[in-house]
Image (spheres, coloured by chain):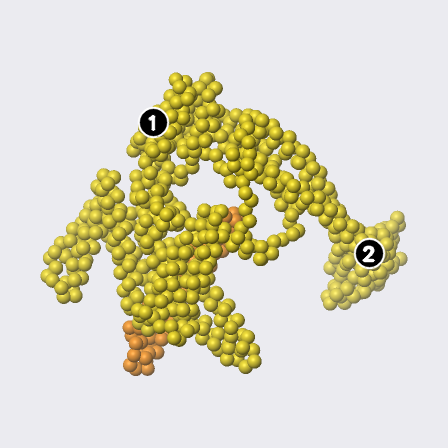
Chain colours: A yellow, B orange
Amino acid sequence: MIKPVAMQKLQVIGLQSDKEAMLSRLQGLGVLHIEDIAERAGEWEIERDHIPKYGMQATDLVARIEWIEDFFGYMREASKKGVIDLVMDWVRPVVERPVKVERIGTERLLNEAEAKVSSLERVCLRLDKKFNDITEKQNARTGKRTKIENLRVLGTKLSHLKDGPNTRVAVGLMPRGLDLGAQIPRPNYYYSRAYDEERQIIVAIVMLENGEGLDKLLRQNGFVPLPVDGEKTPVEELKAIKAELSELAKEADEVRQEARKLDRVHKRGMVVLKEQIQIEKSRADQYHSFVKTGSTFMLEGWVPRKDVEGVQQSLDNFGDRTVVNVSDPTPEEVEDVPSILENGWYVKPFELLLNMFGKPGYKAWDPTPIMALFYPLFFGIMLGDVGYGSLLLIISLILYYGKGKYEPGVRQFGFILLVSSIVTIVSGFMFGSFFGNLFPWFTPMWMDPVKDPMPLLMIALGLGLVHLNIGMIFGFMQNISNKAYRKAVGEQGGWMVLEIGFILLALKAMGFGDGVYLGGFFTLSGIALLVWMNGPQQLLGLSGFIGNWVSYARIMALGLATGSVAMAFNLLSGMGGDLPYVGVLLGPILLVFTQLLNFMMNVLGSFIHSLRLHFVEFFDKFYEGAGKDYKPFMITRIHTTI
Amino acid sequence: MGELQAAGVAIGAGLAIGGAAFGSGIGQGTVAAAGVGAIAENEKLFGKAIVMAALPETQAIYGLIISILLIVLIGAGV
């Protein structure tokens, strides 16, 4: 529970002809975390291994299936899910049962997959092209429509507005107030009309040879040409375009329907096929981490010590043709060993929080059990309200029993919130907060921090001191157990001695005992130890220590803030409710809305700050979180079963 | 407890939280802006971005503590 699982290094050398069979067995066992040793091929003067052909075939198939899935997703786009569906997805998710599949050989699987995917792909490509064609036509029509809309006011046939064999026509916008009619080269036709508040639309026709002169004149006067597209009058053209667009929309819909029909029929099959192919692909991908010679190959990896025998037995089937070397990690290799945490049912969900920071290194101890105790405690005091706690309880239950049934991450999160919400409710009872001061008859069982926050501050700082000391003792014991004596003294021991000194001196200052000499001795030796181990800059660390401790005061601050803001909102809603006529409706609405807002803000705040106290102040005392994730080579079956 | 003292406490408490919240607000704004940029590139970072944005809240909380201490310890008589 405290130490990560013991691991051993496995080195397997075998014949190329046995490689696939051996890998299949290893994949079935699912305990080997394969190291990438291919990059060291150079120093051993042998070659890297390459991904086999079936691996590339599998990768290709997966990519094509994903294209098909994307295509179906794109075609589905028009029908959006409602809010109700979204909520129900979390409360009662609809999950398909896994499909039973046969155990068939790699080659047969890939060939059959190739056939199925190819035929579906052909149809989808055809539909895709058709849809793109339709979209292109739609875009062309809408573009034309915009241009024609601009010219609507003119009313003449659009063909008249284009350049003729002997004429140059300019159609466009100019600032109002200008009248260029006189300045345009004769012979001409000039028409202008108001377009909007600032501009007029003009039509100017001149003989071809005067075209340049016209352009120059117009340019000098802020002319903006409007493109002309079409032959008939604007109104007629627009009607025609409208008809065309509705026709195209119908066609697009038909394509969508066809695609959706295919989607319904084939979707499950594609998902199942993809999973089967990915199992093969993941095996082929491992080749990338091996090294080889002409007829042999070698792989290296990590296996939990308790599983080593099982792996050796499985590989015994290959008899003399393979060599399996088992060894314990050397000091240089320690940082490469993946960390597996082993925790009980109550502590395990809190690993979710630890993973946000980083797993412990192989030799380091696992602080999750401590987190499992203190996180809900801090959260509970920070949120500290019966009403909010109950809301959170309901939410956490939904998460845990709803979507959490199928997604372990959500379930872990739900559990953490569940425990935290219970502590919140208890804290609410202790400090008398039920949606703030909404119910005047609700009195605290212990004390009211709003009237006198000092006791709560003492509690917060006291908890902080306990938390920090647990951290230091934990770290100290971990270092001693790993025989890192220098670290034990320099990182934890010195501080602990210093602390004892401070406490003795403080006791003396408050009038207990004659601890001056003892206290002074401890204090100075503590400082001396720290400086000796860590260098003189450690003296600055003293203020850091005080800072870390005071940081725990935020427990009190956040706890108080929740209640105070709730009180303010209650006051506000009360005032809203007192308004004549509207008050009856406004009051309750304000109340619900503001309380929900406060709920969300404070849940977020409590979550983050409890976490931050652990990650920054607590871990600072002993934890590095430099561990590697355990990613075993295994078969992942979600949608299929054997 | 004189009126001047009460006024002093009131102003002091107000300034404490006001100044602290001001700084915290600027910090959170900067982080949130960067967070939005990160999310635009990678949707998965949403959770981390929210957590980061709430971290500068610390400094505002220290201000709150000072205000509360002022009101409670010195302004108690009012």
Residue at 75% x, 47% y is A251
From the viewer's side, name the closer residue of B19 and A53. A53
> In screen coordinates, is A503 left or right of A104?
left
Task: Name the residue beneath numbered marker 1.
Answer: A326
In the structure shown, which secondary structural element does the residue marked by tag 2 occupy?
helix
Establish whether labels 2 and 1 are both on one chain: yes
Report the chain holding disc 2: A
Where residue A219 appears, as percent x and y from the top left, is 75, 56
Picture quadrant of residue A383? bottom left
Task: Name the residue beneath numbered marker 2.
Answer: A239
* Amino acid under disc 2: Lys
* Amino acid under disc 1: Val
Residue B34 visible, this orientation: no
Residue at 43% x, 63% y is A390
> In screen coordinates, is A271 left or right of A313?
right
Where residue A168 appears, as percent x and y from the top left, is 84, 52
Where residue A315 appears, as percent x and y from the top left, is 40, 24
Answer above or below: position of A116 versus B60.
above
Residue at 34% x, 58% y is A377
Residue at 19% x, 48% y is A529
